Amino acid sequence: MNITIAIFFVIGIIALVGALGVVASRNVVYSALFLLLSLIMVAGLYILLYADFLAIVQILIYGGAIVIVIFFALMLTRTREMPLRLDNPKKPWAIVASLAAFALLATTTALTHWKILVTTPERVSYQVLGRTLFTQWAVPFEIASILLLVALVGAIVIARPGGRE
Amino acid sequence: MTGELLLSALGVVGMLLFLTVTTFALVWIERKFLGHIQMRLGPMRTGYHGIMQPVADALKLLFKEDFIPGSSDRLIFWLAPLAVFVPAFLIWVSIPFTKELVIRNLDMGIFYIVAVSVVSIIGLVMAGWGSANKYALLGGARAAAQLISYELPLIMVILSVVMLSQSLDLKTIVEKQAVIPYVLLQPLGFLIFLFASLAEVGRTPFDIPQAESEVVGGPFVEYSGIRWSIFFLAEYVNTFAVGVLGALLFLGGWNWPLLPPIIWILVKSYFLVLVIFWMRATFPRLRIDQLMSLAWKVLLPLAFLNILIVGAHQFYRWPAWSLSLISLVVVLAVGYRLRWRRIAGTSRLGLSLATERRLANDRTP
Amino acid sequence: MIGLLKGLNTTLKTLFRRPVTVQYPDEHLPLAPRYKGFPALLWDDNVQEPYCVGCQVCARYCPTECITVTMKDNTKFKDGTSTRKKIVDFFQIDMAKCIVCAICVEVCNFDAIVMSDAHEESVFSRGEMVADLNRLLEMGRGQEKKLRKS
Amino acid sequence: MKMEAEKRFDTVDMMLNMGPQHPSTHGVFRMVLTIDGEKIVAVEPHIGYLHRGTEKLCEGEYYLQIVSLFDRLDYISSFNNELAFVIAVEKLMGIQVPERAEYIRVIMCELNRIASHLMFYAAFGADAGAITPFLYAFREREQIQSVFEAVSGARMMHNYFRVGGVIEDLPPDFGDRMNKLIPKLKQGIQECDDLLTGNEIFIARAKGVGAISAADAIDFGMSGPNLRACGVLEDIRRSEPYSVYPTLDFDIPAGQNGDCWDRYMVRMEEMRQSLRIVEQAIAEMPQGPVIAPQVRKIVKVPKGEVYVRVENPRGDFGVYLISQGGDKPYRVKIRGASFCNLMTLKKLLQQCYVADCVVVLGSLDIVLGEVDR
């Protein structure tokens, strides 16, 4: 039993608990906090995988920005208007759909032949990462940024008071 | 492996002690400094010139009743101070004080610091929401909006430093400034950094989340005793972090001659912190919308401009003085523009005075 | 930007100026000669009795009705040692009610009451704020000494 | 369906109860704000937390005692309140006040005006979020207060003016004191000016905030520096002169836009003008008695009624006095300047932010003692 594997299991279990909390929690704000927990634990997994740049990005983007925005939106909607019981009549369907997705993923994971590295993987330096991102993956990168821009404009349009006139 | 781990643990303990002492020192310095600026003495009762005042305050806070409002969300109320406190301390893991004096130097040190410090916003928002108080809620909302907005110019200006030094490693960044500190190369960048980081730690003129006169302490309004002191500790630790980061990124860190490096870094950091206190003593507070427009319409474009300037400088290999010159010109232009826009029309009163006087005297019987 | 720098300059200048405050319980600012503290009664040293005859005019004109006075026959008048036919029997001022307006001093026809320097009169219970004749006379004696000095 | 989708994005207004225990409502004033985010949608002012029934009390008190009650109305500018009442009584009784007493009164009132405006400066700075203006202004105000202490024996509740004059002549060292004080005050006010006036952040906070037009201001019964900030040249010291004001030379500063900035600037300038008045009054002050000889200790006022108004630091302070003879008034009606100024709040706070709310309230410079009476 390697210490790394132990840490992996601890982090992984916490991340799963967090993810379960997101869906199981009755309180939307708690859900957001569980989401944060889960995301930060995923960052921990990245560190275990020698992808520390990705881990920091994970904390910065998801921990910092996304969860805050979600939190913000939840905080400003009143609990009175937002029913605390997050029930939905379509719950059975959701269970079926998610189980199907889980089955698909599980079978794929099980059936794939994973190459097991015997040696410790090389750390990808952020210089290499940056260079690859801006040369080899430049087009997807730009498309992603256009997507974000569109989302940004859309958010402003929705949020603008009297923007419809 | 274990030896290294032990050393790290020792470093962490040492850092915690150091930061606690620093907080006490900063509290005392701030109170004395503000006192003397306002022509009073500040604390004088405990010890020589009140030097033990922070200790007395801390003891008082420790023994205060730990009050949790009945309608608050207990879990979140309880977690919020930790969520602010932990990131505030985590960043110190990778801040080097000298070449050797660092717990764990990361080759992406500055990026790590920026990323971790963002998490503390969540704590403020949690405090605001969990207290079930409208002032706290307003304060929390303000904190979130402000901190997210100022994250961008801050990152952008740090990016320009990174471009100059070609490294994310704080040690390398400092070593590159052995001859010329970056504040001389990009005064514009330094100013943006100063303002953005002031907003990040929520000090005057950007203390909008806490705004005593408006939202009476913002997210912390329901906190008391030990919980409140954790927020307080985090705030001062963050303020000091701004000082140290400013010293590392712009003032050449620990390398200046004569004195040992550790003295230099402390002198520079405390100098920056004093400047922050000085601003607190002088400036009023901005309004939330003005704060936002400052972030998005002034600081962010300027930060981008700064990146462009630095990029051009790097690309065309311009001499160093040209970079400082361009930067300085931009600073002056912005300063002039700010003044011109605000002052225009303020002399009206002086103009009207003469006419009013004549009119007024006409009416005298 | 100029205004900001000007403000910073102003605060920097005052930083090095002498503080204007006084460390209060250790040092006191001098009181003005006319300082109005709580009212006190004066003592007539010639006949060894208070000046006050208990005529109640102060009690009547006190805006907050904090003064209670009764009068009695003066035994010294019968002896011929005093010119006062009546003398104060009971005099009580509720300092908690007193608003130090000095109207009692103004209306007194016998110059028997003055405004003393007493102003640091914090006590632990409300009852202690009520000053009786003896305490008022004592306060007045302190005031007389000060008057004589000046 | 479309309606529903639109409705889902509508936000809900929040009610925010500001005061009476809020640090910047200048005493015990309460506003119920309805806010949309940070924007104020509606404001409902609630007054009365400091109601002491002064007007009713006056009906049962002797004229002598009422002066001490008037001290406690606008406790920042006690001398000016006292003045209004004693002038009212003097008018009813037809008393000619000795010249020296008039000058003493004017000096005290103008010093009081400076002290009051300094208090405004202090609180306004604090409302805008600066901490040092408070201490600067209090340093200057302290010097004025100690002059008051030397003259009247009290730092705040003076009870110094009497029907027919003042209770006591100035102390012998008054001239020296003033010679020292006036240059110091000038320098102090200049320092206050340097600290805050040019500050871009402060200008951004005050300029264009809480503006009111001259016509509206008059309709609301606004008065004093607040009205003059709208560009209306109404100063009772000029338009209905009392005491020795007609012989003194001073300017009436006025603004144009009627916003917080103008209100602030008008007051800063008024402090300087008041210093001018004090200087002149000290120079021109004659010798002589300080109280009219025919006035007895216990004032008896003939039957009649009178309305007197004076220019308080806060504006038009009026006293309507009905006497049915005897030593107590039948009715005393007080027109508080702060009260009328405060009533514009609803108008001023339209489309403001929560942060503006305290600045606007601070710029009105209200004293709750006078609002609630």
Image: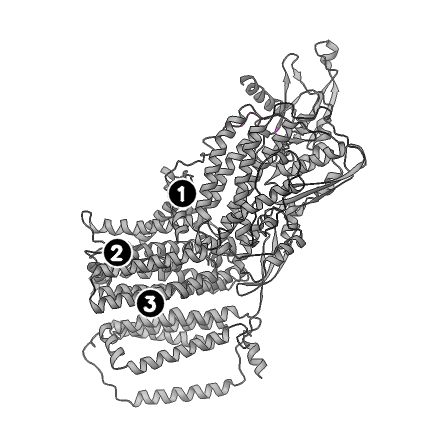
- Give the extent of the magenta segment: C30-38
The residue positioned 40% from the left and 77% from the top of the image is A149
Element type at marker 3? helix
Q: Name the N-terminal-most of marks 3 and 1.
A: 1
Q: CA distance from mark 2 to mark 3?
A: 19 Å
Query: Where does label 2 land, which residue?
Result: B184
Give the SS element for disc 1. helix
Given the image, on which type of amino acid does mark 1 rest?
A: Ile
Q: Residues within 10 Å of mark 1 (few under 14, many from 20)?
A: many
With B74 as the anchor, is D21 left or right in this view? Answer: right
Check if mark 2 and mark 3 are on a common chain.
Answer: yes
Dot 2: what SS? Answer: helix
- Please state if B151 lies on the left or on the right of B14 as rendered: right
- The quadrant of the image that shows the C terminus of chain B is top right
What type is the residue that disc 3 sits on? Phe
User: Mark 1 near mark 2, Cβ–Cβ under 8 Å?
Assistant: no
Whole-number angstrom distance, CA of label 1 to CA of label 2: 29 Å
The residue tagged 3 is: B304
Residue B305 shows up from this direction: yes
What type is the residue that disc 2 sits on? Answer: Leu
Residue at the image position 31 percent from the left and 49 percent from the top: B271
* Residue D355: image location, x then y, percent: 52, 57
Crowding near the residue tagged with mark 2, few <14, some 14–19, many ≥20 C-alpha atoms within 10 Å: some
Q: Nearer the viewer, residue C122 or C83?
A: C83
Q: Do badges 1 and 2 share one subunit? A: yes
Q: Position of residue A136 (x, y in %)?
A: 25, 82
Residue drawn at (43%, 75%) of the image: A152
B248 over D293 or under it: above or below: below
Is D234 inside the magenta-drawn segment? no
- Position in image of residue D371 (x %, y %): 65, 47
Residue position marked by numbered label 1 in the rendering? B37
